[in-house]
Every structure is written in C-alpha cells, then in structure tokens.
Amino acid sequence: MTFSKTKLWMSSRDYIMITLAALIYGFGFSAFILPEKVVIGGVTGLGTIVYFLTGNPYLIGITQYAINIVLLVIAWKVVGRAFVYKTLYGATAISLVVTLMPPLFSGALVPGQPFMNVCIGSVLSGIALGIVFTHNGSTGGTDIVAAIVAKKTNVTVGRTMLYVDFAIISSSYLFFHDITRVVYGFIVLFILTYMLDLIINSNRQAVQFIIVSKHWERIANAINKYPRRGVTVLDGMGWYSKQPVKLLLVVCRKMEAVTVFRVVKDLDPNAFITQANVNGAYGEGFDQLKFRPDHELSRKLEADKSCGAPE
C-alpha cells in the first residue's frame, strides 16, 4: 500500500469513526438524558435550554451551528485546518443526530429510573466524544475550546470541558429554578468527562520495563523491530552471583506492553522483568511538552555559565 493510499485510508477511517461516535452520542443523549429533562454542558446544553424554552427541537442543532461558526474561526488559526474540517463534519453529524433522534423516543428507555438513565447516557456520550477526539475530530462547542487549550498547555481535554460546562449547567437554574435538574446535569458532566479522559488517555498511558536476561541483545533487537521502541542498555551487577549483567530499560505505550512481554517470553522465558506505570513520557515517539515559556528562567539559564551551552 502506497503512502497516499495509507493516508487516504486513515483519513477515511477517521470520518467513519466520527460518524459512529455521533450515532452513539445521539442515542445516549436522546434515549437517556433528554427524556429526563436534564440540561448538560456544551453547546448541546445551550441548545437544550432553547429547546425547553421554545419546545422546538430543531433549535438544538441551529443553536449549535451558530456558536460553532465563531469557534471554528478561532480554531482554524490555532489548532489547524484538518481539525476544523473534521470538527465541521462532526458538528454537522451531531446536530443532525440530536435533531432527528429525540422524536424517536417518547420517554427514557429505563422508565422511572432517572439516575440510571443519566448514568447510562453519560457513559455513552463520554465514550462517543472520546472516539471523536482520538480520531482527530471534534463535535464542536466546548470541544473546540478544550482542543485549543490542550494544544497550548498540558491541561487535559476533559478538565477544560469540566470548567466550561460547569458554568453552562449552573446557568440552567436561572431559567428553570429546578435544583434537581442542575444536580443531574453535574452528574452527567462528571461521568462524561471521566469517560472522555479515560478513552483519550488509554492511547497515551506509558509503562516502563527493566529486563535482565542473558539474551539481552536479541531482546533489544526484537523490541526495536516489533513494537518499534528504543532500548537503553545499562551496566549492572547481580550481587547474588557477583557477575556483571546488562539491564534493558524500555518505555512504551501501555497498549504495546503485551508485545514486549511476548518478545521476552519467546526469546528468554527465564528473563527477569519488571513493569511500572509512568505518569508521563515526553520526547520523540511520545507526547510533546506543552508549557508556557518562563522568560525570566530562560534569561537566568542563559546567563548561568555553570549550566553550559547546548552542543
């Protein structure tokens, strides 16, 4: 498969997954959350408020689009053209789904269980948004704001949405004066953002291996070749045997850990191996550091000769 065909397939796969996610989101929202008259966060929440005030379900999608136009102009400059295209597609899909699906459900799928309906709808919606973000897209609204913040800082997407949506849900009390509706809105918010971060970070979680084996060269070559991860070889000494040993230090994505285990088991079933979770992995092949520059610290480092100049 040529590079162009691979790139075309990956782009098509993104749009397919965004479409699937929109259907999941629409189902969770229309079948579980909206029938309980709960106002959620994001532009969907703003559209829901307009819907409850007017009784016109089509205004949910119209409200979403009006707000998204403004946010997409900002995202074009900050996040990038590809993100805007997929956001426009995702926002269109979500708007259509949340407009067309609600009439299909006369009530919640679990009658008389508002808390259960809210929880189920939140889980489905969170999973759907996580799928959208992991495929380089967005459903618009506060998703765009979260993506812009995540592009510039290390603040997670879910946490940014938490702050913005908190204000939107709280504002619903000014319109309906129903504290129960606000409480359920917060339940949706916390479950949704938790599931969103869980789905997104499942691709980012890293683990660290320390491997001790007589066949360390074969294992190191195999790890370079198959999970395609770097290996650092350290010199050590086994104090029980008083013999020098080689230690392999490997950092990889959590989803690649199974491949590392299989490599070691196949090449040396008697190898000693430890695995530890890594809070963060940054650099080539992993995430990039995103911190606001500290100009004062930069000047101090440049003036401090003891730090030396980079070669």
Image (tube, rainbow, N blue to C red):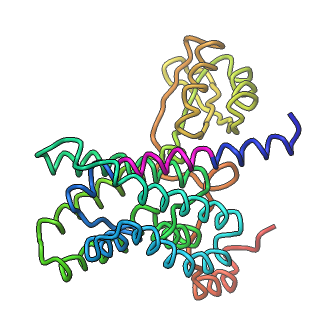
Q: Could you tell me residue 214's position as x and y percent?
A: 65, 17
Q: Is residue 176 left or right of residue 206?
A: left
Residue in the image at 19% along x and 41% along y = 110
Q: Considering the image in quadrants, where does the C terminus appear?
A: bottom right
Q: Nearer the viewer, residue 66 or 309?
A: 66
Q: Could you tell me residue 50's position as x and y percent?
A: 32, 76
Residue reaching furthest right? Answer: 2
Q: Nearer the viewer, residue 300 or 168?
A: 168
Look at the image and say whether residue 266 sits in the magenta stretch. Answer: no
Q: Could you tell me residue 293's position as x and y percent?
A: 60, 80
Q: Nearer the viewer, residue 232 or 89?
A: 89
* Number of residue marks: 0
Magenta stretch secondary structure, dominant: helix
Q: Is residue 105 left or right of residue 68?
A: left
The answer to whether residue 200 shows anywhere in this view is: no
Q: Nearer the viewer, residue 52 or 155?
A: 52
Residue in the image at 62% along x and 85% along y = 300
Q: Considering the image in quadrants, where does the N terminus appear?
A: top right
Look at the image and say whether residue 28 sits in the magenta stretch. Answer: yes
Is residue 35 positioned above or below 3 on the image? below
The answer to whether residue 238 shows anywhere in this view is: yes
Tell me where residue 244 sits by quadrant. top right
Is residue 27 positioned above or below 70 on the image? above
Q: Is residue 5 left or right of residue 304?
A: right
Region of the chain picked out in magenta, as a range: 16-29
Q: Is residue 118 left or right of residue 59?
A: left
Residue in the image at 51% along x and 61% along y = 139
Residue in the image at 56% along x and 72% along y = 148
